[in-house]
Image (tube, rainbow, N blue to C red):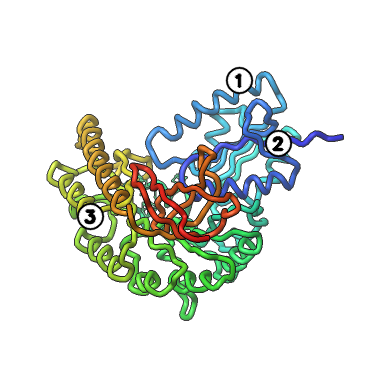
Amino acid sequence: MNKAKKLYLETFGCQMNVSDSEKIVTLMKGIGYQQTADPVEADLVLLNTCSIRATAEQRVYGHLGKFKSMKKQKPGLIIGVGGCVAQQEGERLLRKAPFVSLVFGTHNLHLLQKMVSGAEQGKQSVATDFLDDEKRFDLFPHAESEGGVSRFVTVMQGCDNFCAYCIVPHVRGREISRSADKVVEEVAALAAAGVTEVTLLGQNVNSYGFKEPGAPDFADLLRLVAQVEGIERLRFTTSHPKDISPRLIACFAEIPKLAPHIHLPAQSGSDAVLQGMNRGYTRVQYLEKVRALRDACPGIQFTGDMIVGFPGEDEACFEQTMELIEEVQYADLFSFIYSARPGTKAAGFPDEVRRAEKQARLERLQAAQKKITLARNESFVGGVQRVLVEGPSSTGDALFGRTGGNRATVMNGDPALAGRLVEVRITEGLQTLLKGEILDV
Ligand code: SAH
Ligand code: SF4
Ligand code: F3S
């Protein structure tokens, strides 16, 4: 009998890569590979890479070194690299790491089965062409639903915004939307398999649409997906503040299934820096969107991304970022030190902020946010939240779920509640999670 071949897959970067990796698992299953968590068992190693920050390429090469030595022990081992570094490096990756068998870019998942089968015959291959056609979303079956409570569904890919610091438009290509029918079809299939929550996914979901008269925009798409029976909660990510329309804001007031949370990266609180970043909004415009969202949906939770040390950011600019986080009161914030990426506009800007200064600013920002997060979590104590139960908590002796505002919550209860929305009285607000008691079942 043929022993099942084993796939070891490592995923780096954003939800887009996580979602692509789910598809990779399904595709590899189709040609006889079972996933394993142990690289030593693997017949096929795939790295799904991210190039958002400096030294990403070096890190991938460093990481590959480990598998090179494994291949010495096991010459049949197939090593492949996909995702954003693969897109960027292409052929160069094979030259620098000749023990790699396949390099597949961000638009080339549909070729993966063929490439791996070729590698089994000793063939090396590279595929990094962009495929600017919405058909590419549905050239292969969707990721298999293995039950689960919450899933991502891709609605668009790529980005046309070209923020001055960002590599994503270069490695993910132009913005392309997937047809609303296909999105609804996938959501309905997930609902039929027992999924309760979907997160609509794209680099900038707010600019979803075919921009033809009568074609659905993102607000329309949300309404269509909300009609799918069995889906109890709806989320989306990521949003660009400049593209949040009044129609989209109204969705938070009008679609009960839409969770009261939005990830709305500001990147900086300073107009001069925002302009250098090519973000397309001012601090005041950002705050207006925040206020409009709060008006439409009192209690909505904000999360965001912030970059410190962008070229031209002086102490006064940074203070404006510090003030912005106090004003918005983010539930959570992801903050990064600016790093220059090859081929981006900002890579040509003189990088005046000293490394030690960038680090000090990051630490100040993170310390201030930590306090805000804790105070917000404490503010929920005594109130009732609707929590979607995802399953057992990491310690195994309680249940884990998320509030509508996307706060991690732990409570006691029957594991059979997984997938259900329950009312929870919050008893404790800690730094990274809430604790509570289920009120009714
Ligand atoms: N499409 C999303 C995510 C982009 S990448 C969006 O527009 O929000 C995720 C985050 O990484 C960005 O929001 C930004 O804060 C950070 N980032 C991107 N490029 C960076 C760079 N060159 N240096 C530091 N942080 C960066
Ligand atoms: Fe990058 Fe800006 Fe596009 Fe986000 S909107 S992916 S930060 S270029
Ligand atoms: Fe990284 Fe590519 Fe996502 S660069 S953040 S994995 S789109």
Q: Is residue 114 left or right of residue 384?
A: right
In depth, the one of 88 and 244 nearer the eye is 244
Residue drawn at x 49%, y 61% is 440
Q: Residues within 10 Å of mark 2 (few under 14, many from 20)?
A: many
Give whichever of 182, 274 is nearer the camera.
182
Image quadrant where residue 423 sits: bottom left
- Does the rendering let one see residue 278? yes
Real-space Cα separation, disc 3 to disc 1, in angstroms:
47 Å
- In the rendering, at what x and y percent does residue 404 appear? 42, 59
For badge 2, the amino acid type reads Ala
Lower sequence index among marks 1 and 2: 1
The residue that mark 1 highlights is 69
Q: Residue at x 49, y 32 (%)?
A: 60
Mark 2–mark 3 Cα distance, whole angstroms, equals 47 Å
Crowding near pointer 3: few (<14 within 10 Å), some, many (20+)?
some
Seen from this angle, which residue lies furthest bottom? 214
- Counting from the top left corner in percent of width and height, residue 299 is at 32, 62
Residue annotated with mark 3:
275
